[in-house]
Image (spheres, rainbow, N blue to C red):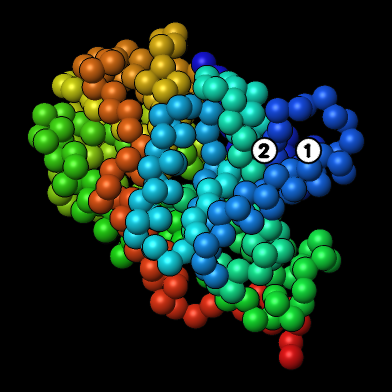
Amino acid sequence: MKKISLLTIALTAMMATATFMACSSDDNNDNATSNVERYQQAVDATVKAQKKHDKAILLVAFGSTWQQAFDTFDATKAAYEKQFPDYDVYLSFSSAICINRAAAGQHVAKRNFYAPNYWLEAFGRVQYGTIVVQSLQVIPGEEYTRVINYIKDFANNSNGDLDDKYLSGCKLYLGTPLMADYPADVDNLAKELNKKFSSYASKGVVAFMGHGNPDTYDTYKANIRYNQLETALQTYSTNYFVGTVDQPDNYKNNVYARMKAAGITTGKVYCHPLMSIAGDHANNDMAGDSDAPSNLDENDEEVSWKVYFATAGYTCNNETQLITGLLEIETVRNLWMQHTTDAINGEPLDFYHSKNPE
């Protein structure tokens, strides 16, 4: 079973360089500078053609290479266009791996995505007066930090080609991840998840699989949101559990240990990804067909949640895999959209003036 780890992503991104995060059907051009400019020209053309307002929303997702995920992103963009009719809405991927694999047509027809820096640069070139960047991350962890850094680079004209007068007056806003704040965001998500999955919790365990960050990537100590969410969900039903792919001490074997401690040793286990979309992790790490674990007390990354809990004696099979992303649940998607509204109604970011005091 193949899994994209944060470490692999980070190393690949470092080797590719931060700006080389775009794709094209022509992968034979070895001139990196020419490629970067070509990607920028493609985004510039898109923005010029689609610009209808003076305000823009940039949705920033990690990315995926699965059609279901692409459909979810498209539906999310359409929902934003309906909810924010005075804004032009664009979508970007932050993962170089996902961008390149989408361009290569892995699992799906070839499709080009571009990294946030290209979109922000294009926004600056057409001089949008208001720019809202909305993080589609679940927790405020490593990927969210990258989103913030993209905005800082734009505000401080990292390419040196934007008009400083424009930048000094451009209003920048940042919409936070799904569980940015505690307890409000966590409680709101728990409430909506319970509405959606209470019927399953009445018949067995509902195990949510989040991504999580390894210790070295646990920016803002955001992993605790998964533990807080499990606690909030269990106020509705003790059959809710929340584990992750990468958070230490909160892997599937740790979820199993908590289930046993609660006296739940048999019955159905429904698995659902606690991620914005259902992609590689949902289809492989959660619901994939893998070899059985040799030791239930250890976390073997190559063993799927489905196979792990089935081996542990629970009814966990294809029928109990609920493979939908959080953005596919309208009421949960609305929580992200409320974060966008809250950002717009708040104070603009001061990234330009903090570096360029007037």
Image quadrant holding the C terminus, namely bottom right
Q: Are marks 2 and 1 in contact (CB under 8 Å)?
A: yes
Quarter of the image where one finds residue 308: top left
Amino acid type assigned to the residue bearing label 1 in the image: Ala
Instruction: State left or right for residue 140 relative to residue 99.
Output: left
Q: Earlier in the sequence, mark 2 or mark 1?
A: 1
Asked whether the viewer can see residue 31, the reply is yes
Instruction: State left or right for residue 318 relative to residue 302.
Output: left
* Rendered residue at 19%/39% (across/down): 197
Quarter of the image where one finds residue 296: top left
Nearer to the camera, 231 or 348: 348
Asked whether the viewer can see residue 145, the reply is no
Residue 189: % across, % down: 29, 53
* Rendered residue at 66%/69% (across/down): 127
Disc number for residue 96: 2
From this view, report whether residue 92 is shown above or below residue 83.
above
Residue 204: % across, % down: 15, 29
* Rendered residue at 47%/51% (across/down): 136
Nearer to the camera, 327 or 114: 114
Decide: few, some or many residues near mark 1? Use Cα within 10 Å; few <14, some 14-19, many ≥20: some
Which residue is the extreme one toward the top? 291
Residue 36: % across, % down: 80, 44
Residue pointed to by mark 1 = 16
From this view, report whether residue 308 is shown above or below residue 88.
above
Nearer to the camera, 97 or 265: 97
Report helix, strand or loop for mark 2.
Answer: helix
Amino acid type assigned to the residue bearing label 2 in the image: Ala
Instruction: State left or right for residue 199 relative to residue 209.
Output: left
